[in-house]
Amino acid sequence: MPLGARRAALEGGDAAPSPLLLVVLLAAVDELRAERDRTVAWLTLLGLRAAESDANFVLFGTFAIVWFLALFCLLPVGLGAERDPDSGAPLSPQLGRKALIATGIAIVLWVAFYALIAFKILDL
């Protein structure tokens, strides 16, 4: 796709992608679906149950949302009174530690969410 057409598509212009590009993209989607179906069949042969593809998006999306929510809730915690005199930013925000704590919180909440789905309390 030419740069002008891509830019127009991003800006909501009238330029449409070429029919050839659409055919190639749709073929790629069909190939991905076939690969997903083969993977689900293989997992079933192993005695495992694969979640529906839309459910996978919900499961991984839920983890990301919960992680960011936990991180944003932890950002103001434990900043202390020491500030940079020029910018007013905290001198020791401990972002790495807060990211690890957010990961732990997200894992616990995601496991609880998954358990609700696995025990058929929630249905996707």
Image (cartoon, rainbow, N blue to C red):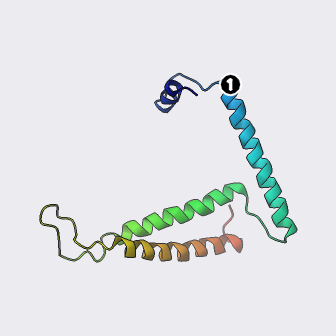
Residue 119 % position (x, y): 71, 75
Left or right of 47 in this view: 74: left
Q: Which residue does the image show at 67% across and 69% down from the upper left? A: 117
Left or right of 14 in this view: 76: left
Residue 115 % position (x, y): 65, 75
Q: Amino acid at mark 1?
A: Pro
Q: Which residue does the image show at 64% across and 71% down from the upper left? A: 114
Q: Quadrant of residue 42?
A: bottom right
- As drawn, 10 above or below 16: below
The residue most toward the top is 14
The residue most toward the right is 45
Callout 1 environment at 10 Å: few (<14), some (14 to 19), or many (20+)? few
The residue most toward the front is 2
- As drawn, 115 above or below 41: below
Q: Which residue does the image show at 36% across and 72% down from the upper left? A: 74
Q: Quadrant of the C terminus?
A: bottom right
Residue 61 % position (x, y): 56, 59
Of the pair 18 and 113, the residue shown nearer to us: 18
Left or right of 101 in this view: 59: right
Label 1: which secondary element: helix
Left or right of 36 in this view: 115: left
What residue would you read off at disc 1? 19
Residue 27 % position (x, y): 75, 37
